Image (tube, rainbow, N blue to C red):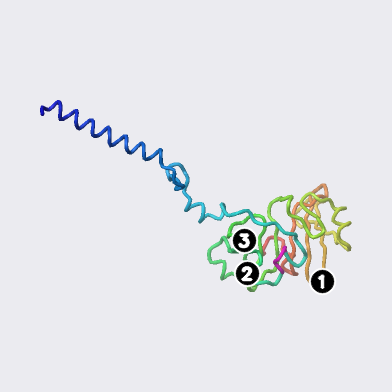
Amino acid sequence: MNKKHIWLTVALIVLVITGIGVYQRYSDTSDSPDPALGGDTATEIANPTFAPDQALYELRADGYGPVQIGMSVKEAAEALKMPLASNSPDSDEASCFYVYPHGEPGTVGFMIREGKIARVDVHFENPDIHTDKKIRFGSSTKDVQAAYSNVRIEAHPYGGPNEKYLIYEDGEHQIIFETDQNGNVTSLRSGKKPEVEFIEGCS
């Protein structure tokens, strides 16, 4: 066999091997994602952002859905059927901190003091979250007054002259609605005193 035939044979072998590789790549019908195409399933499972949508519950003065003010983190997680964790390092050693479903700040946050849930904050303007009296983001001051008896109105500590706190009190628990210049609800939180009255979270 002369050199020309040898080179032709080698080239043919290379072409056959390359063709087999291409065929296997594009004929693979398995469900395994190709990392090069951004389909890293392991990352999706580990990242709470890809967790199933959270169930939404009504906010009450004494809790949120199955979660009662005064529960431990473990009890609340079991009631919600999802993990609750802090997104801050060393938070378990703090006297006051927040936990969130799957450890990711989202729809709701639970303030923890002395190992117990003391307050529930509704984050973002989610129109699907409402109180047990159907008050939600965008509800008017008149709506709140009609839904709850004996609502106390106070000046917003940081807001303009027309921004208010609408405070509904039920024993040792409260719901605090913050309103904007037009008198519409922009923030919701509930819990026990004094924690529910804290202006900036734990401070």
Q: Which mark is residue 171?
A: 1
Mark closer to the observer (1, 2):
2
Q: Is residue 29 above or below residue 10?
A: below
> In terms of depth relative to the viewer, which is nearer, 33 or 118?
33
Mark 2: amino acid: Val
Would you call the spot at circle 2 few (<14 residues within 10 Å), some (14-19), or many (20 or more)?
Answer: many
> In terms of depth relative to the viewer, which is nearer, 166 or 203?
166
Q: Which residue is the extreme one toward the top?
A: 4
Mark 1 falls on what kind of element?
loop
> In terms of depth relative to the viewer, which is nearer, 147 or 44?
44
Would you call the spot at circle 1 few (<14 residues within 10 Å), some (14-19), or many (20 or more)?
Answer: few
Mark 3: amino acid: Tyr
Q: Which residue is mark 2?
A: 73
Mark 1: amino acid: Gly
Q: Residue at x 77, y 63 (%)?
A: 60
Look at the image and give the residue range highlighted in magenta: 64-68
Mark 3 falls on what kind of element?
strand
Q: Which residue is mark 3?
A: 100
Q: Is residue 30 above or below residue 174?
A: above
